[in-house]
């Protein structure tokens, strides 16, 4: 008994994705979708020698047949993929006794970093990591061997995911379809890699990162009772480790000095922007009393909270 064909749902509207005017941006490239469909070749169907000016990705989800790439014939079977790049002459034929289905993605890829000479503006910004990956992928597409391989990294399911997004029209469908197209390109390239290649990802300076997270947490909670152990626990590190990070990244300031700085910044703001009493501002700012704030404030700035208010008040 024949297994269910996972792409059966695409049979009724084989050109649904082609009705969309898709121009997506990846790194410094514009990718214009020309064909994006499921098609079926009846037994013995022949598509004589032809070529395109753009890239065409051919995936065989079911059936078998033959492709001739330039002058080399190759047998096709379910699960295979091949790419015909710009100006590559090719011939397709379904098996004489068995039909062949094909998922086709036909795209024009334009390098926007090269458009200045034409008077057009290039894409204003591209994430450098994304741009590097896009460039690596597109450059490899230009040099892929002219022979079919198995769809080892399962690019085909992304045709179905893009189709379902176009039909269900859920929130984020455009981004979903864009990501599907990019995944098809990436997984097609990976299928030709002789062995998995270790890739890099952007990495953080963990000391600076944890210091910044600590500052954000201290600032957000400075009006309440916040202690070093609480912050360390939120960062999943020891109190001793956090102390070292603060000393290293904070210009020699201690945890208590940083907390006091944030509290005094808020006090100064309230003194300028409100008519609250000094006592209320002190308590709201995390100080135990107005008299204690008076002592700390005078020691830090050389004058009292009331004197600061008279000099800077806006209300």
Image (cartoon, helix red, strand yellow):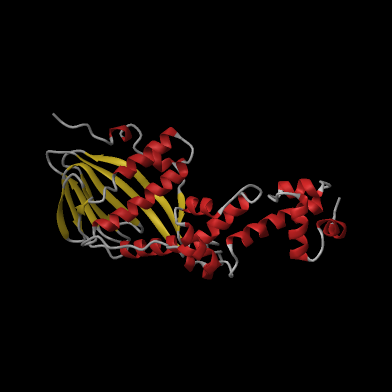
> Residue visible at 27% across and 60% down?
88
Task: Name the spot of residue 52 as percent of width and height, x first.
Answer: 33, 56
Q: Is residue 280 above or below residue 69?
A: above
Which of these two is toward me, 307 or 166? 307
Residue at point 72%, 46% (across, down) = 284
Residue 298, position as x, y percentages in the image:
78, 62
Residue at point 24%, 54% (across, down): 82
Question: With 152 as the anchor, is 251 left or right in this view?
Answer: right
The one nearer the camera, 184 or 13, is 184
Most foreground residue, 271 or 12: 271
Image quadrant where residue 9 sits? top left
Q: Quadrant of residue 292?
A: bottom right
Quadrant occupied by the N terminus: top left
Residue 104 position (above or below residue 268): above
Toward the viewer: 195 or 20?
195
Answer with left or right where residue 59 lies relative to residue 162: left
- State whether residue 142 is above or below residue 217: below
Q: Residue 197 appears in which quarter of the rendering?
A: bottom left
Numbered circles on residues, count:
0
Residue 51 horizontal/vertical position (percent)? 29, 57
Q: Is residue 308 visible?
A: yes
Q: Residue at x 87, y 57 (%)?
A: 310
Residue 64: x, y in percent?
A: 16, 44
């Amino acid at each position: 008994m024949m297994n269910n064909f996972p792409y059966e749902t695409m049979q009724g509207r084989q050109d649904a994705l082609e009705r969309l005017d898709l121009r997506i941006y990846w790194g410094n490239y514009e990718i214009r979708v020309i064909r994006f469909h499921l098609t079926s070749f009846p037994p013995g169907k022949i598509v004589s020698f032809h070529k395109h000016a753009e890239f065409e990705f051919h995936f065989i989800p079911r059936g078998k047949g033959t492709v001739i790439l330039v002058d080399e014939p190759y047998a096709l079977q379910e699960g295979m993929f091949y790419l015909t790049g710009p100006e590559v002459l090719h011939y397709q034929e379904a098996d004489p006794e068995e039909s062949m289905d094909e998922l086709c993605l036909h795209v024009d890829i334009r390098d926007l970093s090269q458009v200045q000479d034409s008077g057009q503006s290039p894409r204003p910004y591209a994430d450098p990591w994304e741009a590097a990956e896009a460039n690596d992928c597109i450059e490899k597409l230009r040099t892929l061997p002219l022979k079919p391989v198995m769809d080892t990294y399962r690019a085909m399911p992304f045709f179905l995911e893009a189709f379902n997004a176009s039909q269900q029209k859920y929130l984020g469908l455009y981004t979903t379809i864009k990501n599907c197209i990019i995944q098809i390109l990436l997984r097609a390239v990976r299928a030709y890699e002789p062995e998995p290649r270790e890739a890099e990802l952007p990495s953080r300076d963990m000391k600076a990162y944890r210091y910044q997270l600590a500052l954000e947490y201290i600032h957000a909670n400075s009006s309440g009772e916040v202690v070093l152990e609480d912050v360390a626990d939120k960062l999943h590190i020891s109190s001793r480790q956090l102390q070292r990070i603060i000393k290293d990244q904070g210009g020699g300031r201690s945890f208590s000095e940083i907390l006091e700085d944030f509290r005094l910044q808020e006090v100064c703001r309230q003194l300028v922007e409100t008519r609250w009493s000094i006592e209320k501002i002190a308590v709201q700012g995390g100080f135990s009393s107005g008299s204690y704030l008076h002592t700390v404030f005078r020691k830090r700035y050389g004058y009292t909270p009331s004197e600061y208010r008279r000099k800077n008040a806006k209300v």
